[in-house]
Amino acid sequence: MQNPYQNAMKQLDKVAKVKNFNDSFIARLRQPDRDIRISIPVQMDDKSLKIFEGYRVEYNNALGPYKGGIRYHHDTEINEVKALAFWMTLKCAVANIPMGGGKGGITVEPRNLSKGELERLSREWVRSLSDILGPRKDVPAPDVNTTPEIMTWMTDEYAKITGDKTRATFTGKPIEKGGSEGRGPATGLGGFYVFNALRKDLKLPEKCKVAIQGFGNVGSNAAEIFAEHGHKIIAVSDSKSAIFNKDGLDLKKVQAHKKSTGALKDFPDAKNITNEELLELPCDLLVPAAFENVITEQNARKIKVKAILELANGPVTPEADEILFKKGIPVIPDVLANSGGVTVSYFEWEQNLKNEHWTEKEVFKKLKPMMEDASKKIFEESKKSRTSLRMGAFILALERIQKKML
Ligand code: NAD
């Protein structure tokens, strides 16, 4: 398994070669402001005590309070959280929102816990970290395997400890608990706005054939939004398998099949393929929307698409990036492609602090021009600097952060 933090630092080294940045600024960005590891004791249902390992990385707050999700996963460890916190720093700068970068997590397989155990674990994470969290300090959100319900427990625990009534310390809450309209589809929708803003520049057809890896919150929302706009979703996958139909999948039926069987596998109108095969399908657009490090130097040469839209964080390794760039396959980078999520999280924070509630229409109306503006600026920068879209995004973000820090 590649170390995602080393990958993130390779990306930082690369951008420092493409564009002239202040050396001290780059040196500062090689380390987070702080990374915190905590032991979380949880009383299990059988009354035994289990200790979990948890994290919060506060990477950089030059532009505003640290912002970033909390991941619950058995593979989560400090280097992954550090990398994700670094990318959050850039993502907030790309989206041009007044937020810095952070990330959190717990090494846990949440499916193995009862609801009560999960709640006690989540509340205890907040108890251990309540001193450093807060609407003006550090604002966590959901990530892989963390849900609006978990955010409700966390918001409640934080209010109990500190008396905070704003509900602005956590975003991604259910709407009736102070969440924003539109947060569910925000990441997939933001990705679609970015794709649309760049489609002609990247010489992609008006109607694309799309393969999507991952069918969770981000992947399934993206699939629906692309399909609604006339694109053909030819393959989707989850952790167990992938399904493929060259004529396009009926997503409503796919959802129903997943709901009734618990998996995508054996969907009647499609062929079962592997996740590896999905990545290598010939089509117009490949959308990794599951995990990091799925396109590597081992499979990058076999990728046959016209463009890649990174809705997951860090799905393409730096080595694979080089190969794809040489092959002329543009990669729309995570820090741009999935920044719709954090942008609507920022809207939620703003609504909580102002005690407002915006309609979904208002939310999307604010989101769209922000995604389009970032896409255009990044495309222009990558053209000007004769580099990839990722490096274009890094340059835009680092220039904004550097200006503030220096
Ligand atoms: P999720 O838990 O809802 O979904 C993850 C999906 O990936 C599931 O369908 C799961 O079955 C699938 N999966 C797991 N392992 C896989 C594997 N090895 N191969 C193929 N599929 C696999 O998570 P999510 O919120 O949709 O997040 C997905 C990615 O998007 C993550 O990288 C996350 O950091 C990133 N992201 C999420 C948001 C957001 O708003 N949720 C915002 C920005 C970025």
Image (cartoon, grey):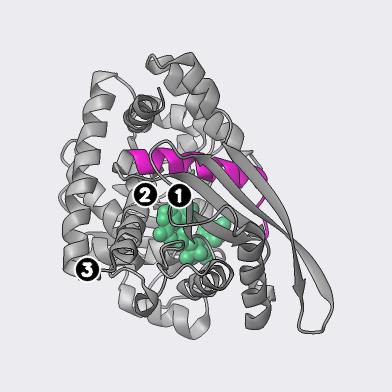
* Front position in the image: 22 or 316: 22
Is 82 included in the stretch rendered in magenta?
A: yes
Asked whether the viewer can see residue 204, the reply is: no
Where is residue 150 shown, x and y percent of the image?
53, 72
Identify the element where label 3 is drawn: loop
Residue bounds of the magenta highlight: 74-93
Report which residue position mark 1 lands on. Answer: 279
Q: Residue at x 63, y 39 (%)?
A: 2
Q: Which quadrant of the figure has residue 177?
A: bottom left
Q: Residues within 10 Å of mark 1 (few under 14, many from 20)?
A: many
Q: Earlier in the sequence, mark 1 or mark 2?
A: 1
Which of the marked residues, 3 or 1, is nearer the chain's N terminus? 1
User: Which element is circle 1 on?
Assistant: helix
CA–CA distance between discs 3 and 1?
38 Å
Above or below for 326 versus 127: above
Residue toward you, 21 or 348: 348
Which numbered disc, 2 or 3, marks the residue closer to the eye? 3
In the image, is residue 353 part of the stretch drawn in magenta? no
Q: Secondary structure at mark 2?
A: strand
Which residue corresponds to mark 3? 358
Dot 1 and dot 2 residues touching (CB under 8 Å): yes
Disc 2 C-beta below 8 A from ligand 1: no
Find the distance from the CA under tag 2 to the CA under tag 3. Answer: 33 Å
The kind of residue on which mark 3 rests is Trp
Q: Please tell me which residue is depicted at 52% across the width and 45% down the height of the picture.
A: 84
Residue at numbered disc 2: 286
